[in-house]
Each structure stands twice: as C-alpha cells, then as structure tokens.
Image (tube, rainbow, N blue to C red):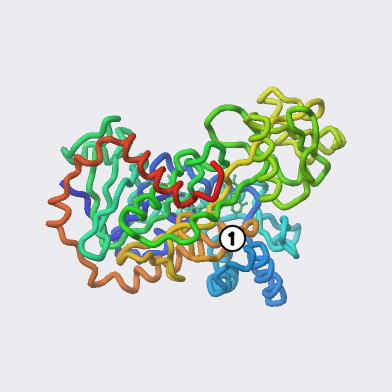
Amino acid sequence: MCYQTDVLIVGSGVAGLYCALKLPSDLNVTVITKAGLEECDSWLAQGGICVLRSEQDYDAYYEDTLRAGHYENDRSSVDIMIRSSQQLIRDLVSYGVEFERDEKGELLYTREGAHSAPRILFHEDITGKEITSTLLEAVRKLPNVTLYEHTTMVDIITAGDHCQGIVALVGPESELAGFSDGPVTDDGRLVLAMEAREVVWACGGIGGLFEHSTNFPHLTGDALGIAIRHGIRLRDPDYVQIHPTTLYTGRHERSFLISESVRGEGGILLNNKGERFVDELLPRDVVSKAIFAEMEKTGEKHVWLSMEKIPKETILHHFHNIYQTCLDEGYDVTKEPIPVVPAQHYFMGGVDVNSDSRTSMRQLYAVGETSCNGVHGANRLASNSLLESLVFAQRAAERIGQEFAGKTVDHEVTRQMDLTGYTDTKKLFADYKADILKEVSRIKV
Ligand SMILES: Cc1cc2nc3c(=O)[nH]c(=O)nc-3n(C[C@H](O)[C@H](O)[C@H](O)COP(=O)(O)OP(=O)(O)OC[C@H]3O[C@@H](n4cnc5c(N)ncnc54)[C@H](O)[C@@H]3O)c2cc1C
C-alpha cells in the first residue's frame, strides 16, 4: 500500500514549516522529518534574523550581502530577499514571534560581523528556537497538515520528467510505522512509497557529512545525493562555510562554537609547542586554512586557543556560556588553553533553484539550506540564512498554490517500483555520502 498526499514537504525546519503554513488550506500537506521535530539547525540559530530597517538602508544592506558573498551572489535573489524582509517580519510577529524591544515597544536591532549597520532582530541568543517553535505551534493547528517524525526520505519517485513522490524509511517511533506490509530494512525500518503531486525538499545542510560541524549530525545532505543520482542540477556545491574555532572533544557529535569575538577580544591560537602560527584576526577561511595546515604538519587533531590575554571579568560576563560549556568539558578557560578545530558551519551551495524555489525537475521544489538560489554567493552574510529560508519557502508555497491544478501522479509507476532495493541502509547512505563529497571536493573534510 502506498501513502498519498497532495504536497509532501521533507524537513521541518523553518523552511519546511513556513512552506506548510503558506500553502493553500484546501491542499492536503504532509511534512516528514528524519529525526524529532526539535532536531534541526533552525532551533540552534543564535544571533538573529536580518531585516531591511528603512529605505535608506537598502543600498548598504545589498552591498554588505554582496561583499560577504565575494560578489558571486545572484543579485535578483538578494533583491527579493531584502525587499521581502519587512513583510516577512510582520508576518512572524503576527504568528506570535517575539523579538527584543525597548521600553517604548520599538524593535531593537543588533549588528554582527560584516554588517555596516545594526539590522538584526533577535530574541536573547535563542532566536532560532523562538521562530521555529512558534511556526511549529502554528502548523500543528492546521487541519490540512500532518507531521511525521523519524521518517527519512531515501529517494524520489519519478515518472517521465517529473517527480511524483518519495521513498521513505519509516522508523518504529513514527506514527507511520505499520502503514504497509512493505519490505523492512536491515535496521528495522519500513520502506514506504509516498506519492505526492508536488514535493518540497527542505532538508537543511550537510554538516553531518563532516567530522566536525556545528550542525545536527543527521543533516547529511540526502537531497543532494538523490539529486546527483537523478541528474537534478546542483549549484556551487563546493561553497561550504567553515568556522575556524569550535571546541574539540574527540567525540563525533555536534561541535560547540567558540565565537569569533573571543579572538576579537584577544584570544590567540597556538600549536602543540605553544607557538602562535597565524594572525587570529584574518578572515574565517584564511584562519581555518592555517589551522588545517598546522594540524597536518604536527599530526594533531586540533590546535589550542588561549584566552589568557582576556581579562577574567570579560570571560565570566561576555563569554559566560563558553566559559561554562568549557568548564563542563574539564577546561577552565581563565587558566588554560582549550583544544579547537575548524568545523563545517553552513552550506551556501545546494540544489539549484529559481526565484520560486523550483528545481530543474518538474513538480520538485527545494527551499532553505538544501537549496541554492545564489543569494549568499561564495560566503553567507551573518543572519541572512533564516531570512532567506523563510522568504523563498513562501515563494515556493505561492507558486505551488498557483500551479497545483492539473498536476498528476501515475500510480502504476509507483506500484511497479522494487522497494527491496532500499533495505541495505548502510550502503545507501555511504553511496550518497561519497557522491556528495565528490562534489564538495575542494573542501577538506
Ligand atoms: C549553531 C548555528 C547557529 C546559527 N545561527 C544563525 C543565526 O543566528 N542566524 C541565521 O540566519 N542563521 C543561523 N544559522 C543557520 C540557520 O540556522 C540555518 O541555515 C537554517 O535554520 C536552515 O533551515 P532549514 O529549514 O533549511 O534546515 P533545518 O532547520 O536544518 O531543517 C532541516 C530538516 O530536514 C530534515 N531532513 C534532513 N534530511 C532528511 C531526510 N532525508 N528525510 C527527512 N527529513 C530530512 C531534518 O530532520 C530537519 O527537520 C545557524 C546555524 C547553526 C548550526
């Protein structure tokens, strides 16, 4: 038996949830996620979300985005994102998202690296959680949307030149478990064909493919692996943002970010002989390369970051969270250096989409970090990614709403699929990983 829905959204981060919210309410929408609903990078975003503050800031915001992206950005995408930002923020507020305000109730704006003016809205240092939890609450209220956790897309179903659904592995924890008597994988998951007249990939980034990443480890770029297999166009797959300093623990788990402002305040990088080897205030990519080179030279798995030049007061107040987390790991940063290693942080490239988030395959859209509309160019400007994910998810939903009538599914194609080919999950994911990393080959893993 095959599952059927009108629109199938793969991923429940900000991009997937906002797309679900903006689809016409007469469509039957299914959202699946590989893990639990709170396990996605959208929940981790700390700094905030950019917005165009006023017409006077347009040129500066546009230029900052282009400069950060090494002028390789798609200018039309940048314009759409900036022009859509005010309406988008009003919409988030209408759902109940709370941003910091002054005593008069006016929005407060902060500033991050490479921004020439304060234009970032924030909620403490948990902006992503505030936005994503609010959107999730709104989606849960929609009678036309069903959410399934622990349900993993491993392929798409194609008929001729269009997409008409996905193949999913349904974990025993999922409400879809037992939906059909189809084949079962080596690790006990049901292989299920899920038909849809439109499919939206909202699968996030690729951090899980890297030894060190600030992303959730289950974000392994599955959509990209599937795209490569089906000849769906990618764009800039080698544009991966690496953050130079995350805490090295030796465990394969999400890396804890050691903010760039630690080096700004006087933190220095040392090799295993206690010698400095790079100007710590150089751009992110230069510092990361120097660290990788040093690690290769010494054969060590990390370098060291010393905060000895930073006053204790500053560490305890300004960097309280870093201080506490390092202490929990056994390092007192007021007294000793900490091991650090560069980690993958963000994916600027992705599945190539147009300004309505359509991929090169019919009836298949991609939104959020999985997609690439060129907005970030070669490097993302801080706090542009939540905004970009939301703006272009809404555009996908609007386009699907306009074009939905007339979209068909050939049930016979699905019926004839051999689902037993998906039971060897280790091989399946290893093959996808190899394919994706080949595309990302300029980056050191
Ligand atoms: C530590 C950290 C801090 C950040 N801070 C900021 C910030 O301050 N401002 C900012 O703008 N951006 C920030 N970002 C980036 C931003 O959070 C992400 O780019 C954005 O949230 C991506 O949203 P998304 O919906 O595309 O992906 P995600 O939120 O990562 O969601 C991806 C979804 O896809 C699902 N999925 C993946 N593969 C499959 C599959 N095969 N089958 C089914 N489901 C699948 C996942 O389970 C998940 O539900 C930060 C990122 C990190 C890691």
Residue 45 in the image: state x and y as whole percent.
Answer: 59, 48
Q: How many marks?
A: 1
Q: Quadrant of residue 262?
A: top right
Residue 316 in the image: state x and y as whole percent.
Answer: 80, 34
Q: Secondary structure at mark 1?
A: loop
- The crowding category of the residue bearing disc 1, from other C-alpha atoms within 10 Å (few below 14, some 14 to 19, many at least 20), is many
Q: Nearer the viewer, residue 119 or 234?
A: 234
Q: Residue drawn 25% across and 72% down? A: 405
Q: Quadrant of residue 174?
A: top left
Residue situated furthest front in the rendering: 297
Q: Nearer the viewer, residue 96 or 175?
A: 175
In-image side of 165 versus 131 (left or right): left
Q: Residue drawn 73% across and 28% down? A: 272
Q: Residue drawn 79% across and 29% down? A: 274
Residue situated furthest bottom in the rendering: 55
Q: Is mark 1 within 8 Å of ligand 1?
A: no
Residue 270 in the image: state x and y as whole percent.
Answer: 77, 34
Against 153, residue 106 (above or below) is: below
Amino acid tagged 1: Ala
Q: Nearer the viewer, residue 26 or 251?
A: 251
Residue 227 in the image: state x and y as whole percent.
Answer: 36, 55
Residue situated furthest top in the rendering: 330
Q: Which residue is mark 1?
A: 378
Against 405, residue 423 (above or below) is: above
Q: Quadrant of the C terminus?
A: top right
Q: Quadrant of residue 55?
A: bottom right
